[in-house]
């Protein structure tokens, strides 16, 4: 039988120990609760925790309890040297894993660290659509942080869509993991070229088999890579679900992907992957938000606000992941994080914040080493970057049409520059470009781009592209007294009805 150890000094625990502490450590703390109730609510500590300045927190705790640096270090899972350097502000404690471990050891709530708290209700209870869940942000943030507060996350794999019977694996090796990694790249490239419908069922089936690898024998050195490969496959499969407008499945898959990425936290790509999954969740929320060109009803306004909140919280959590990463995060991930943040601010009509984020994105993309990009970022060409920034200005134009000309300039560069193998990316940008032309009053050019969009989208299997056409129809409703726009709208309605 293994012996229990003191959670502070690591020594043996005797019967009757106090709060997981040995007698000496309990006397050092004075049999107090560590930390006392309300200890972290002071303005000074709230500010330190919001900035993840654990050095200031360590000093305050030791002053309050009389703990030595060694006792505190053992309690939070650091070395005495790390605690000392943090207290002297010579080295910050960084990384989500460290933040979560320290918070758990010291009783610091997620809210004090700037994250949502526990969701209301029991996630294991009555099943509801994941698009309608008001606790979705809390769930994905908990998964991204590796939080142990939500046991339901450990069962998320059983709730993935379209379950299928697969044979369990006994042992997993390098070749198996390489096959998973290659599959993720393949599904991503095919989605870019053709849309999601042709590959969705295959990806889900493969993911269900890969899930069984969790219980197979695997060397400890390979286990983190297996978790990251599993997370990436779930991430790509979630994107395929999103592209086919199955938003409920996308959110389940991304939550599972986040959980798997955190289980592979010892792998250098874990944090980079976590950030990108969160950014796709933000991307989806903005897609669900979409501008309402007619005065919204109170219910529509509430739903819009919820989607914008989800988008911003996911983007902010991605930014925190990037800023506190245990391993270096790729520059393109930093740049994409800034781009998505710009979309979130633009959708809210905050031009100042959007411009600031766009500037950061431009600088970061310019610094990225194009010859050493992570496998997932093959789509990040100059055309894609122009389209990303153009989309920001398009979203701003929904609040102020003066931004439409800049949106046209950037979106045109994106549309014209996309390679044939990125046909879906080009097609999804075309309705937005047509909408920007409508905003400037150039109805004829808008109609031409609408026709091009319908032609291109018809060659793909992306339901999301048809939703973009519906968005264009809503924009055009403002201008349909013009015969050209009226014809444009009729064509869109006929095209969407035939496709769906």
Image (tube, rainbow, N blue to C red):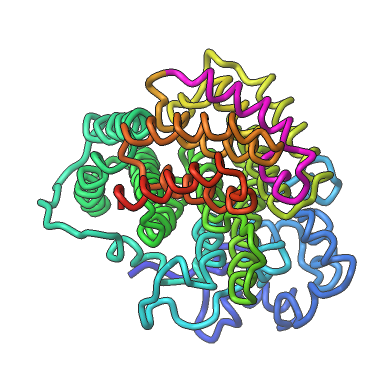
Relative vertical location of residue 197 with respect to residue 57 in this rendering, above or below: above
Q: Residue furthest right?
A: 44
Depth check: give the residue in front, 129 or 253: 129
Residue at 62% of width from left, 63% of height from top?
Answer: 9
Residue 414 on the magenta segment: yes
Asked whether the viewer can see residue 423, the reply is yes
- Image quarter (top left, top right, bottom left or bottom right) of the N terminus: bottom left
Whether residue 300 is situated above or below residue 439 in the rendered picture = below
Please tell me whether residue 384 belongs to the stretch shown in magenta.
no
Residue that appears at 60% across and 16% down:
369
**In the image, residue 404 lies at what x, y percent?**
72, 37
Q: What is the x, y in percent for residue 38?
A: 78, 80
**Left or right: where 350 falls relative to 310:** right
Q: Is residue 436 above or below residue 101?
A: above
Could you say where residue 274 lies in the image, as x and y percent from the top left? 51, 46
Q: Specify the segment rendered in magenta.
A: 393-419
How many numbered marks appear?
A: 0
Q: State the residue in front, 291 or 273.
A: 291
Secondary structure, magenta segment, majority class: helix
- At 60% from the left and 82% from the top, the residue drawn is 18
Residue at (35, 58) in percent of width and height: 249
Quarter location, residue 40? bottom right
């Amino acid at each position: 039988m293994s012996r229990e150890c003191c959670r502070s000094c690591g020594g043996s625990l005797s019967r009757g120990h106090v709060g997981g502490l040995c007698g000496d450590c309990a006397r050092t703390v004075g049999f107090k609760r560590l930390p006392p109730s309300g200890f972290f609510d002071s303005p000074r500590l709230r500010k330190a925790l919001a900035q993840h300045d654990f050095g200031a927190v360590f000093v305050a705790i030791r002053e309050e309890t009389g703990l030595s640096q060694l006792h505190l270090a053992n309690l939070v899972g650091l070395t005495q040297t790390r605690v000392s350097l943090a207290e002297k502000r010579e080295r910050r404690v960084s990384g989500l894993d460290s933040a979560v471990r320290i918070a758990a050891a010291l009783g610091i709530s997620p809210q004090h660290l700037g994250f949502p708290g526990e969701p209301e209700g029991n996630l294991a209870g009555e099943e509801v659509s994941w698009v309608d869940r008001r606790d979705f942000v809390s769930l994905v943030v908990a998964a991204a942080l590796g939080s142990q507060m939500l046991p339901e996350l450990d069962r998320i794999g059983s709730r993935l869509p379209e379950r299928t019977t697969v044979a369990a694996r006994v042992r997993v090796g390098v070749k198996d993991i390489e096959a998973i990694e290659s599959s993720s790249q393949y599904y991503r490239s095919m989605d870019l070229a053709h849309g999601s419908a042709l590959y969705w069922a295959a990806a889900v089936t493969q993911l269900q088999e890969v899930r069984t690898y969790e219980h197979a024998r695997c060397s400890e050195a390979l286990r983190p890579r297996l978790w990251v490969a599993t997370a990436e496959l779930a991430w790509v499969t979630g994107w395929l679900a999103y592209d086919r407008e199955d938003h409920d499945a996308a959110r389940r898959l991304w939550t599972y992907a986040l959980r798997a990425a955190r289980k592979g936290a010892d792998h250098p790509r874990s944090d980079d992957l976590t950030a990108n999954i969160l950014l796709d969740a933000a991307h989806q929320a903005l897609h669900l938000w979409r501008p309402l060109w007619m005065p919204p009803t109170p219910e529509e306004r509430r739903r819009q606000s919820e989607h914008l909140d989800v988008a911003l919280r996911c983007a902010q959590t991605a930014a925190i992941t990037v800023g506190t990463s245990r391993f270096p995060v790729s520059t393109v991930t930093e740049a994409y994080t800034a781009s998505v943040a710009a979309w979130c601010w633009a959708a809210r009509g905050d031009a100042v914040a959007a411009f600031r984020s766009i500037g950061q994105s431009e600088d970061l993309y310019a610094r990225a080493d194009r010859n050493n990009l992570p496998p997932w970022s093959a789509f990040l060409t100059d055309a894609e970057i122009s389209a990303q920034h153009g989309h920001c200005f398009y979203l701003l134009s929904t609040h102020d049409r003066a931004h439409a000309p800049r949106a046209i300039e950037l979106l045109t560069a994106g549309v014209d520059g996309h390679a044939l193998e990125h046909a879906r990316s080009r097609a999804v940008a075309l309705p937005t470009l047509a909408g920007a032309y409508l905003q400037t009053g150039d109805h004829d050019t808008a109609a031409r781009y609408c026709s091009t969009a319908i032609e291109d989208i018809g060659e793909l299997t992306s339901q999301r592209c048809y939703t973009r056409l519906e968005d264009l129809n809503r924009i055009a409703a403002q201008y349909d007294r013009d015969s050209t726009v009226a014809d444009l709208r009729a064509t869109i309605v006929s095209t969407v009805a035939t496709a769906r």
